[in-house]
Amino acid sequence: MRFDIITVLPELLHGPLHHSIMQRAVDKGLVSFHIHNLRDYGLGRTKQLDDYQYGGGAGMVMMCEPLAACIESLTNVRTYDHIIYVTPDGEQLTQGLVNRLSLQGNLIIICGHYKGIDERIREKYVTLEVSIGDYVLSGGELAAAVLVDSVTRVIPGVLNDETSALFDSFQDGLLAPPVYTRPADFNGMKVPDILLSGNDKLIDEWRTEQSYERTRKRRPDLLK
């Protein structure tokens, strides 16, 4: 799977995408990350990327020409399944959306900055808009990293234990159950006996019950 990420601040993405699980996915040849500095497509001697809003108002807007030039330089070479813009007013990022995107081949992700991107870029090029939550970040780079990480980790072969992702929160519409490791007794706080029983059937039933109970208490909206 190939990710092409368009950004004003490429430095913000190098760390999240080149360590731990993400780097192992690259080393295995399962994904590739290509970060494109939008400044390379800036206008004039100063490589201008933004300008004042028409109609007035605070905040600068990313201009059409640099973004269009960068997008077309990519789409002229290969076909993309989606051109994604990460934005607070996009579709909420859920595990279901993550799973669907993991089945794609090539994705472009546009990181907004300043007051956002010119609406005409959204109308002409963007095929999917994604929000990671009801809040605003200084730029789209961190949101893009969240999106890429969540999609990459469910691609078969990325995790050492492929079944691990199947039991993450939200995969079955529920929160994950509590988990424990050694020691079995920590300052008088003991691991539930059922987890030490060796009875896989009873353990699975306990985990399912705990998932429902945790979801009921913390995210009852999911049960609807």
Image (cartoon, grey):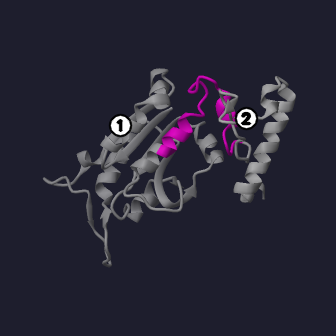
Is 147 included in the stretch rendered in magenta? yes
Name of the residue lying farthest toward the front: 188
Residue at disc 1, secondary structure? helix
Residue 123, position as x, y percentages in the image: 46, 61
Query: Which is nearer the eye, 39 or 166?
Result: 166
190 relative to 196, above or below:
below
Left or right? Give the position of 50 relative to 31: left
Query: Which is nearer the eye, 3 or 23?
Result: 23
Residue 14 marker: 1
Q: Residues within 10 Å of mark 2 (few under 14, many from 20)?
A: few
Q: Quadrant of residue 36?
A: top left
Q: Nearer the viewer, mark 1 or mark 2?
A: 2
| Residue ID at (16%, 54%) | 44
Q: Residues within 10 Å of mark 1 (few under 14, many from 20)?
A: few
**In the image, which residues are magenta?**
146-171
Residue 58, position as x, y percentages in the image: 31, 73
Left or right? Give the position of 186 relative to 44: right
Location of the C terminus (image quadrant): bottom right
| Residue ID at (62%, 47%) | 97
Q: In 3D space, how far apart are the residues under numbered discs 1 and 2 (Cα atoms)?
A: 41 Å
**Callout 2, which amino acid?**
Lys
Residue at disc 2, secondary structure? strand
Residue 154, position as x, y percentages in the image: 60, 34
Left or right? Give the position of 57 relative to 122: left
Quick one: label 1 or label 2, which is nearer the N terminus?
1
Residue 12, position as x, y percentages in the image: 34, 44
What residue does disc 2 label?
190
Left or right? Give the position of 24 relative to 164: left
103 relative to 70, above or below:
above
Query: Which is nearer the eye, 183 or 129?
Result: 183
Name of the residue lying farthest toward the bottom: 55
